[in-house]
Amino acid sequence: MVEADTRGMVRFSATFYVSCDDKNSFQSFVLEFRPDLNEWAASLFEDYTVDYLDFLTRPKL
């Protein structure tokens, strides 16, 4: 089970720890979602400024 609050985020990373019944089966890996490191992918997020993302995803008080 994985849960994360990524509202308003255009990049993030996560570390996953995986193990089975055999105690020697432990493995971990890091997953990075970084579209800002790729010109083509970064262009998809150009219109999503911090203020705009906050407006879309944060509760209004």
Image (cartoon, rainbow, N blue to C red):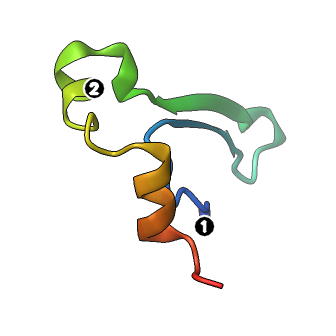
Residue bearing the label numbered 2: 42
Quick one: which residue is furthest to the bottom in this view?
A: 61
User: At which x and y percent is residue 54?
Assistant: 51, 60
Q: Do the residues labelled 1 and 2 touch (CB within 8 Å)?
A: no
- For disc 2, the neighbor class at 10 Å (few under 14, some 14 to 19, many from 20) is few
Disc nearest the viewer among 1 and 2: 2
- Disc 1 residue type (three-letter): Met
Instruction: Please tell me whether mark 1 sits on a helix, a strand or a loop.
Output: loop
Q: Nearer the viewer, residue 18 or 36?
A: 36
Residue 49's place in the image compared with 55, above or below, is above
Residue 12, above or below 3? above
In which quadrant of the rendered view does residue 3 lie? bottom right
Q: Is residue 7 above or below residue 17?
A: below
CA distance for labels 1 and 2: 29 Å
Disc nearer the start of the sequence (1/2): 1
Tell me the residue that label 1 is attached to.
Answer: 1
Foreground of the two, 49 or 3 = 49
Nearest to the observer: residue 48 or residue 42: 48
Lateral position of residue 35 relative to residue 53, left or right:
left
Locate residue 47, reporting x and y percent.
26, 42
- Count of all numbered marks drawn on residues in the image: 2
- The quadrant in which the C terminus is found is bottom right
The quadrant the N terminus occupies is bottom right
Q: Residue at x 27, y 34 (%)?
A: 46
Quarter of the rendering containing residue 49: top left
Location of residue 32 in the rendering, given as x and y in whole percent from the top left corner: 50, 29
Amino acid carrying mark 2 in the image:
Ala
Instruction: Work out whether 12 lies above or below 20.
Output: above
Q: Which residue is drawn at 28% across and 15% down?
A: 38
The picture places residue 10, in percent across and down from the top left corner, at 43, 41
- The residue closer to the viewer here, 22 or 37, is 37
